[in-house]
Image: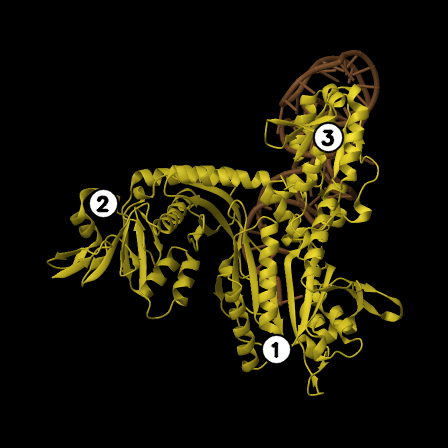
Chain colours: A yellow, B brown
Amino acid sequence: MIAITLPDGSVREFDGPVTGRDVAAAIGPRLAKDALAIKVDGVVRDLATVIESDARVEIVTRNHPDALELLRHDCAHVLAEAVQELYPDTQVTFGPATETGFYYDFARQQPFTPDDLVRIEQRMHEIVDRDEDIVREVWDRERAIAYFRDIGEKYKAEHIETLPPDEEITIYRQGDWLDLCRGPHLPSTGRLGHAFKLLKVSGAYWRGDPRNEQLQRITGTCWASEKQLKDYLHMLEEAEKRDHRRLGREMGLFHQQEEAAGSVFWHPKGWTLYRILESYMRARLEDAGYVEVKTPQLIDRALWEASGHWEKFREHMFTAEADHDRVLAIKPMNCPGHVQIYKQGITSYRDLPIRMAEFGACHRNEPSGALHGLMRVRAFTQDDAHIFCTEDQINAETVAFCRLLQSVYRDLGFDDVVVRFADRPPTRAGSDETWDKAERALTEAVREAGLDYTLNPGEGAFYGPKLEFVLRDAIGRDWQCGTFQVDFVLPERLDAWYVGEDGAKHRPVMLHRAILGSFERFIAILIEQYAGRFPLWLAPVQVVVATITSDAEPYAREVAARMNAAGLRCESDLRNEKITYKIREHSLAKVPIIAVVGRREAEQHTVALRRLGGSRQEILALDEAVTRVRDEAVPPAGFGPEPGERSVDCGSERSG
RNA sequence: GCCGCCGUAGCUCAGGGGUAGAGCACACCCUUGGUAAGGGUGGGGUCGAAGGUUCGAUUCCUUCCGGCGGCACCA
């Protein structure tokens, strides 16, 4: 007798060993038809798995949370079968499921073309329609190695050799095709369905190691239903529309060009956005007890040698020759500079913590293949700061930082933040007690700040544990932005100290921290988060005054002047164009508010406000309109426009 | 850095061994129009760079530069 416990708690008894298929059939014919796999005591297995003793069993159908991985993994197999049918000179390697689909890495002399992808996808659909049974076989290890070697699948043969000796070697056969695979799999290719699509072909290294051969990776997406597939493809389109490189150009925010690969030419509107963000951060940091500094771009290599960067980071550093054979490095980081400021004069324990912030412009020679719009550049500015404190202050500083970070993210439109906690790596500096202390301080602080965290074991820096802050954007993508690192090493290497209560010298701890990460990258994320439709306080141009007829020009100038005098970023559009044309253009430019003025408004001293995305207009007296828009445009930190930023004239103006 | 694809007007793209085309944008003219494209005319290109093949190269080949998609990298 075997007792099978189902998820609802009910128990079914069977005379002897049963397969998953039997269990599903015993529950109902519909379920037997829908079953893709079973979950035995929490482990997903093939439907054909024989259950020999009492167990908890769940039937996995298409809508089960575990089904997607199964479908995707099968889809990878179907891809591989299709490829080998069409291109027999191809060797297979690995083909796992991913978060949105699957890929399979192939070894083949000739590159796959986009046309090949179309053919392969067609063949995949045929294989699904053939509904080939998928059968698991256990093979003898030597036989498996010999088999794969004989048929010229050297990667598979090599892979088996690296598997642990006690691991069962399993083969999954579908139709005439087979693959080495741990499984589990669907009962037949027909169960996969047709909700998949091949997306691209790209390069990948065998076993992820650049010293190995380069393989061709075919990537696809796969879902439980056509609807899900459609939604996903729609999301991809949406992401493309939001692409900051496209919006950056369309909205006239910035450009990049080959003479300065990896750097940014900020245009007036983009730079306005940058400055707003910078002013906001400056206000928040000031409130949080930071002091701001500025350190040199060029520093003699001797300092980088002392800090350890020359040894560890040399290949990413740009250098410049100076007189007398001095080599200067363009700073890739701000920390050594901050330590130099810290070291001027004598620091008492009474002065700690010192929170030293810099909007530090850094340069790193990133590999050409890594560059990507504003997301990955060679010249960038960090919202960097280093907190010099005692070990006892780590906890309080961490809590304060987490709170500040959350509040900043919320202000900028991100509510969904997760924390990754990276603890001690195998090779590290500092004693175990120090690490214990630092790790404990960090985890407690994160909890105290009310943040959830996941462990990223062994991924801390060699000099201390770190927190990584990941925010999720409007279309579900994750971006690691904030970081908080405890450093016991740099103060030692650069000989920073303070005088303690006992009158003796002590080492301060350095906390490296950033919230945005880099302004460039964060602005890219902001552009994509808002799809260019910034909240009023961030919009480079907040209001455009658009005239209907030239009669209204003098009044339009007055309106714009009033808006600018109220600290708003307002432009006027006096061109000889129809109002519909102007509205279309400024709407496409994503200007939040268009103030339409015609003869009527000029006579009555009113404006018609039209919001981006809305079609209704609101007629207000000029005074009221200015007050209302000004109040709406107040930044979350409450900082006002700096005196120099307030336009005295009526701003830029287009006419003619 | 590695693999693949790409580079034609400011932008999006078509073309193709006999030195180039569209739409949008831009300029000028007409039009003064009430909430997402009014009409006309016109200017604009070393076809990414350098070499090679050829009577002739923007087109074919090689190298380089840059971009895109991944991989690797992101201390």
Q: Which of B38 and A369 lies nearest the eye of the viewer? A: B38
Of label 1 and label 2, which has the lower sequence position? 2
- Judge if badges 2 and 3 mark residues of a common chain: yes
* Residue for point 78% across, 49% down: A642
Of label 1 and label 3, which has the lower sequence position? 1
According to the image, label 3 marks what residue?
A622
Q: Which of B13 and A496 lies nearest the eye of the viewer? A: A496
Percent from the top left, x then y, of residue A544? 72, 32
Percent from the top left, x then y, of residue A641? 75, 47
Percent from the top left, x then y, of residue A321? 84, 65
What amino acid is at disc 2?
Answer: Leu
**The disc label shown at residue A31, or none:** 2
- Chain ID for label 3? A
CA neighbours of label 1 inside 10 A, class few (<14), some (14 to 19), many (20+): some
What amino acid is at disc 3?
Answer: Leu
C-alpha span from label 1 to label 2? 60 Å
- Chain ID for label 2? A
What amino acid is at disc 1?
Answer: Glu
Element type at marker 1? helix
